């Protein structure tokens, strides 16, 4: 599929340019939180463009719309968060401290890695749009259901943690209310879940190329649970919350949600 190859090269080049721009902005502002804003909007935008490159059809418009909704929702939230805090995100602040004078070149290298990581995500949108089979049936229902549940769940999780953090009475506490009592990182879980929508759409008619769309959720799971998501945030929370967070780790699973255990039941179980 020559046109799909051309689209793939365009997507990669676009993402590299976006993340190069992100590097320039974070350098000028000394706030690397802007990196996440650029990454989200850039991935959503190029994913939508890649979908529309397949032509204007119900399938391509749906795939592009899902990418746009995801980017606007998540990117908008990160944008407001970046503008609303006077200090740099703890993850990047630690990099700045640990890397010292090597921060800028290392950050540029990191952003190029992020551009490459976003490539299969944007291409999953393209595969969903390029599937040659009619759009419909159980895979359409499944894909839409996954996307709606994921975006709604992540929105609720973000709202709950935002409300918790902005309550002065919660200073120094660990958020374990709502979805945060079911998973220590419900926003990350729903982010992973969202990317499963594209394989569902891309595999209509069991299109072989659609199997490549599974790279997106697999990569997102790896990134969130092993590399840049859960491990980094857990380290920061253990530093800032100490034993309170260790107790939270014992009660609540890291990623996949489950019904919360009560404090009393947990204490009884461990003989406290």
Image (tube, helix red, strand yellow):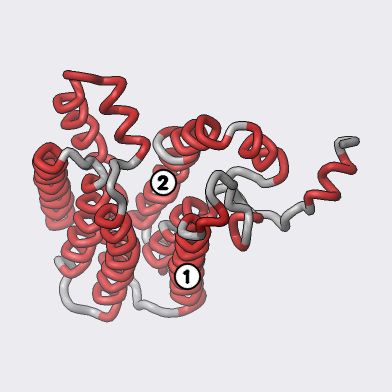
Q: Residue furthest front?
A: 168
Q: Quadrant of the N terminus?
A: bottom left
User: Of label 1 and label 2, which has the lower sequence position?
Assistant: 1
Q: Nearer the viewer, residue 271 or 225?
A: 271
Q: Residue at x 84, y 42 (%)?
A: 267
Question: Residue 226, image x and y in percent?
Answer: 47, 34
* Relative height, residue 103 to residue 43 (above, below): above
Contact check, label 1 and label 2, Cβ < 8 Å: no
Is the residue marked by circle 1 packed among few (<14), some (14-19), or many (20+) residues within 10 Å?
some
Expressed as whole percent of the image width and height from the top left, the position of residue 213 reads 37, 54
Label 1, label 2: how far apart the Cα atoms are:
18 Å
The x and y percentages for residue 124 are 32, 56
Q: Going by the image, does 119 lie left or right of 197? A: left
Reply above or below: 1 against 99.
below
Depth check: give the residue in front, 69 or 123: 69
Residue 21 located left or right of residue 227: left
The residue lying at 51 percent from left, 37 percent from top is 237
Residue at which label 1 appears: 152
Residue 111 lies, with reference to residue 36, above or below; the image says above
Between residue 154 and residue 85, name the one nearer to us.
85
Q: Which residue is mark 2?
A: 220
Q: Which quarter of the figure is the C terminus placed in?
A: top right
Can you say whether 61 is above or below 164 in the image?
Answer: below
Q: Mark 1 or 2, which is nearer the eye?
A: 1
Rate crowding at label 2 as few (under 14), some (14 to 19) or many (20 or more) other CA atoms within 10 Å. many
Give me the residue at 40% from left, 43% from top: 219
């Amino acid at each position: 599929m020559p046109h799909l190859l051309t689209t793939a090269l365009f997507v990669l080049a676009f993402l590299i340019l976006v993340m190069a721009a992100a590097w320039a902005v974070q350098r000028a502002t000394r706030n690397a939180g802007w990196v996440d804003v650029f990454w989200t909007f850039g991935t959503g935008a190029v994913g939508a463009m890649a979908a529309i490159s397949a032509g204007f059809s119900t399938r391509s418009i749906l795939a592009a719309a899902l990418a746009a909704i995801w980017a606007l929702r998540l990117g908008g939230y990160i944008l407001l968060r970046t503008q609303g805090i006077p200090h740099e995100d703890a993850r990047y602040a630690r990099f700045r401290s640990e890397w010292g004078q090597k921060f800028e070149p290392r950050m540029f290298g990191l952003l190029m890695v992020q551009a490459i990581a976003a490539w299969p995500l944007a291409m999953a949108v393209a595969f969903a749009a390029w599937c040659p089979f009619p759009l419909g049936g159980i895979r359409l229902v499944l894909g839409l259901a996954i996307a709606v549940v994921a975006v709604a769940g992540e929105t609720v999780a973000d709202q709950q943690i935002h409300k918790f953090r902005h309550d002065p009475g919660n200073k120094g506490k660990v958020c374990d209310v709502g979805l945060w009592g079911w998973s220590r990182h419900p926003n990350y879980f729903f982010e992973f879940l969202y990317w499963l929508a594209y394989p569902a759409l891309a595999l209509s008619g069991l299109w072989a190329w659609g199997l490549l769309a599974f790279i997106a959720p697999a990569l997102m799971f790896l990134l969130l649970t092993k590399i840049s998501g859960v491990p980094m945030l857990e380290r920061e929370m253990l530093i800032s919350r100490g034993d309170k967070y260790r107790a939270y780790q014992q009660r609540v699973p890291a990623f996949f949600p489950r019904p919360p255990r009560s404090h009393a039941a947990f204490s009884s179980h461990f003989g406290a």
